[in-house]
Image (cartoon, rainbow, N blue to C red):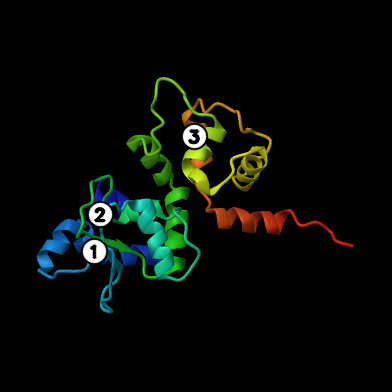
Amino acid sequence: MKKETKMRLISGALVVTMATSMAFLNPQKAYAATGTVYTEGKFVEETESKYGQYVVKKGDNASLISQKICRHFNVEMTTKYWPVIAFLNDFPRIIQPGDIIIFPNSMEEMDNLLAKLKETGWTARYIQKNDVYGKRKKEVTHTVGELLAEIYGQDACIDPDFVSLYLEAQGLKNKYNIDSPIDTTDMLFNLTEWIPTLQELEEYQNENHRTNRR
């Protein structure tokens, strides 16, 4: 997608913010031009910058950087801001240690841009075009339970109750179950558009499954 097309996706104050970032839309070149050596895995503290900046370290990807940015802002860590990272930094591309990744300077701007990318269909198109979740397979080898087992690993007990809670939090209650085969692109997208952390699931359960105590 051309930068000019991207610019039209953002409205209001975000357009002004995006316009100032054109010099950063290729972070690798921006990094090389400064001649400054930054510490990998750290945030760059530059008060004059219109964007926050993070220095890539080995093993980073958009989802992991999303969590690090949340921690940087001292909010609950989540991978859900990966589309914001991808949009602002000209993904898809291979990021290298030392690259500068830019991101909005506040969580409010992060949330606004995330919502706008979803509303305009940019996120859905990006996922489909770039096969983000590896969904273009001739044979389906995963059930919902197996998918969640891959996502959460040994950190969660993937039983019917856990899967039911996950589906409910996604707005998919009674639509699928632990043994449902993942057999369409739309199904995989719906299941993984947002991947809540275990803490987010616990908070959802506490808020929505309260029992009256006498």
Residue at mark 1 = 40
Left or right: where 165 falls relative to 86: right
Residue visible at 21% across and 56% down in the picture: 97
> At label 2, which amino acid type do we have?
Lys
Place residue 33 in its image quadrant. Answer: bottom left
Q: Earlier in the sequence, mark 1 or mark 3?
A: 1
Left or right: where 71 falls relative to 103: right
State the image coordinates of residue 200 (x, y, percent, origin top left): 57, 56
How far apart marks 1 and 3 lie (CA) works out to: 34 Å
- Tag 3 and tag 2, C-beta contact below 8 Å: no
Residue at mark 3 = 188
Q: Secondary structure at mark 1?
A: loop
State which quarter of the image contains the C terminus: bottom right
Q: Which mark is residue 186?
A: none
Q: Is residue 10 visible?
A: no
Q: Earlier in the sequence, mark 1 or mark 2?
A: 1
Residue visible at 39% across and 67% down in the picture: 13
Place residue 178 in its image quadrant. Answer: top right
| Pair 1/3: label in front | 1
> At label 3, which amino acid type do we have?
Leu
- Tag 1 and tag 2, C-beta contact below 8 Å: yes
How far apart marks 1 and 2 lie (CA) works out to: 8 Å
Q: Secondary structure at mark 2?
A: loop
Q: Residues within 10 Å of mark 3 (few under 14, many from 20)?
A: some
Q: Residues within 10 Å of mark 1 (few under 14, many from 20)?
A: some
